[in-house]
Image (cartoon, rainbow, N blue to C red):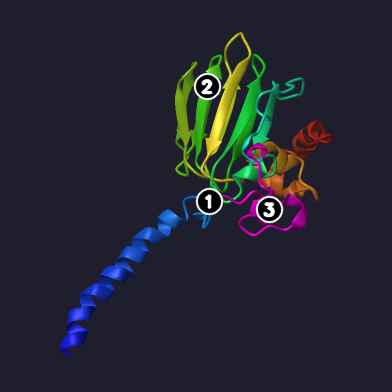
């Protein structure tokens, strides 16, 4: 009985520690259990929290280099923006490391439309231009700021947000994530370009507009 009384506080402390650490473990990708794991993307089409590792004996220095963010993106599209991803699908060396980056090019007036990342917090760094960055909280509070070269803005995980070039020159933003594959749900595309389509009656009710308005907006996204 004496042993049980002495160990009870220790057991409670262990349970409490695990409970406190659980939310932290859910904030980003799982910690790696090896130095590196270069993704072998050809071996699976349905990854579960990562990809199989390329054999370590076949790994070279080139596996840790990615040039994909060096080229300016083509912004000649209706949004006037181009997102170039630097996630694990583009850069296999990120596999299991819990980090990734995107390049966001913005023409004058260009918009990276409202979207959210279900698996990551985002940190925006403005490299060039004047960029309005904003997000909406779950309490429908809008937070925003016009950022210039060298300034940063953090967007909490899962919050709907955007970047818009409000300057007269091209804008460039580097976005960083605490996930190798943060995912992106772009609000207008999700609502009006989903396959199969979201029923018109759902959209008319949700947006409080006539069906003709919904049809018009859907026609704008028919080619996306």
Residue ID at (48%, 19%): 147
Gap in Å between the C-alphas at discs 1 and 3? Answer: 13 Å
Q: Locate residue 102, reporting x and y percent.
A: 61, 33
Residue farthest toward the left in the current orientation of the protein: 2
Residue farthest toward the top in the current orientation of the protein: 168
Q: Which residues are magenta?
A: 36-62
Gap in Å between the C-alphas at discs 3 and 2? Answer: 34 Å
In terms of sequence position, does the residue under pointer 3 or pointer 2 come before the other?
3
Q: Is residue 208 visible?
A: no
Residue farthest toward the front in the current orientation of the protein: 57
Q: Identify the residue under disc 1.
A: 35
Would you call the spot at circle 1 few (<14 residues within 10 Å), some (14-19), or many (20 or more)?
few
Q: Identify the residue under disc 2.
A: 126
Identify whether 175 is placed above or below 149. Answer: below
Q: Secondary structure at mark 3?
A: loop
Q: Secondary structure at mark 2?
A: strand
Q: Locate residue 142, reporting x and y percent.
A: 47, 32
């Amino acid at each position: 009985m004496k042993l049980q009384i002495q160990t009870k506080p220790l057991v409670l402390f262990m349970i409490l520690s695990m409970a406190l650490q659980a939310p932290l473990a859910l904030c980003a990708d799982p910690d790696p259990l090896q130095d590196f794991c270069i993704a072998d993307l050809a071996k699976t089409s349905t990854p579960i929290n990562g990809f199989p590792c390329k054999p370590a004996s076949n790994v070279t220095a080139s596996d840790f280099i990615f040039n994909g963010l060096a080229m300016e993106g083509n912004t000649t599209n209706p949004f006037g923006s181009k997102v170039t991803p630097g996630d694990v699908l583009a850069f296999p060396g990120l596999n299991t490391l819990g980090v990734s980056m995107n390049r966001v090019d913005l023409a004058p007036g260009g918009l990276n439309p409202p979207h959210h990342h279900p698996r990551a917090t985002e940190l925006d760094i403005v490299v060039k231009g004047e960029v309005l960055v904003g997000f909406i909280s779950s309490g429908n509070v809008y937070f925003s700021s016009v950022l210039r070269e060298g300034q940063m803005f953090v967007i909490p995980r899962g919050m709907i947000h955007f970047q818009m070039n409000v300057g007269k020159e091209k804008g460039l933003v580097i976005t960083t994530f605490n996930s190798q594959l943060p995912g992106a749900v772009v609000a207008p595309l999700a609502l009006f370009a989903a396959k199969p389509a979201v029923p018109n009656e759902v959209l008319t009710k949700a947006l409080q507009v006539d069906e003709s308005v919904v049809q018009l907006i859907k026609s704008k996204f028919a080619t996306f």
